[in-house]
């Protein structure tokens, strides 16, 4: 596997420090699992952060009354989706619930990835060979790791293992590989804004 697109230094540093929203972090983790070079960069960042922590003067915790016993009891939350394990899925996805594949267009399907507590929406997309997705931009970020196949747009070609890091400064028209198709996992904040007259027509139908 030849990987040509990786997370920015800022993104990988935030991932190493545990500062990312869990939904965004999950998509980064899918890339890291596939890419030896990103794993090496991550180990270096973690070593640097560990050295910085060792150099910090420890601060004693303030003493105070013990919290009431009821504070230690977590309130029951909504039931999570049942985790699913499938052949070929990244191992980091195994603890998370995966919804069923649902068609959202001709030869395009989506499935939800349940990430409790995440601010970003996480889902998988599967598109058939040669599909051209509508020209669009975003009001937030759209981070994508390619799981199989490939697509390309104005910023390059993205194949299995690649990480596509888009934000409000990017607008693109992804075209799926004409032979392999594409399956990817996406974390998105904000909303998709379709461009052009056709985009304006389809915009009410978009529910990512």
Image (spheres, rainbow, N blue to C red):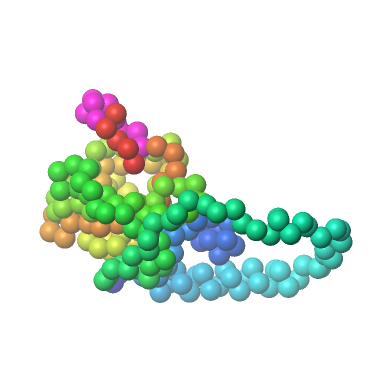
Main secondary structure type of the part rendered in magenta: helix
Q: Which quadrant, please, contains the N terminus? A: bottom left
Seen at 29% across and 35% down, the residue is: 206
Camera-side residue of 175 and 22: 22
Q: In which quarter of the image is residue 203?
A: top left
Residue interval drawn in magenta? 192-203
Q: Which quadrant, please, contains the C terminus? A: top left
Camera-side residue of 145 and 204: 204
Is residue 206 located in the magenta-colored stretch of the structure? no
Residue 31 seen by the camera: no
Above or below, comparing residue 164 to residue 190 in the picture:
below
Q: Where is residue 109 in the image (x, y as percent from the top left)?
A: 22, 49
Q: Position of residue 202 (x, y in %)?
A: 24, 30
Seen at 70% across and 55% down, the residue is: 71
Seen at 41% across and 47% down, the residue is: 121
Camera-side residue of 127 and 155: 127
Q: Where is residue 16 in the image (x, y as percent from the top left)?
A: 55, 64
Is residue 202 located in the magenta-colored stretch of the structure? yes
Residue 81 seen by the camera: yes
Q: Is residue 147 left or right of residue 93?
A: left
Q: Position of residue 182 (x, y in %)?
A: 22, 56
Give the total of numbered labels.
Answer: 0
Which residue extends farthest front? 70
Above or below, comparing residue 93 to residue 21 in the picture:
below
Q: Is residue 12 left or right of residue 69?
A: left
Camera-side residue of 36 and 188: 188
């Amino acid at each position: 596997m030849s990987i040509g697109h990786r997370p920015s230094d800022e993104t990988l540093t935030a991932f190493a420090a545990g500062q990312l929203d869990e939904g965004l972090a999950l998509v980064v983790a899918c890339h890291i699992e596939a890419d030896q070079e990103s794993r090496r960069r991550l180990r270096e960042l973690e070593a640097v952060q560990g050295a910085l922590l060792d150099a910090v003067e420890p601060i004693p915790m303030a003493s105070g009354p013990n919290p009431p016993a009821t504070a230690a009891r977590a309130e029951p939350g909504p039931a999570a989706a049942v985790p699913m394990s499938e052949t070929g899925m990244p191992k980091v996805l195994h603890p998370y619930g995966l919804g069923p594949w649902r068609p959202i267009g001709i030869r395009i399907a989506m499935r939800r990835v349940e990430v409790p507590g995440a601010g970003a929406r996480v889902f998988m997309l599967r598109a058939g060979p040669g599909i051209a997705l509508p020209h669009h931009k975003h009001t937030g970020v759209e981070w994508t790791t390619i799981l199989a196949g490939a697509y390309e747009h104005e910023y390059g070609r993205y194949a299995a293992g690649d990480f596509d890091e888009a934000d409000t400064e990017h607008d693109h028209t992804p075209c799926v590989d004409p032979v392999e198709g594409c399956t990817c996992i996406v974390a998105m904040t904000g909303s998709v804004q379709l461009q052009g007259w056709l985009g304006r027509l389809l915009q009410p139908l978009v529910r990512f």
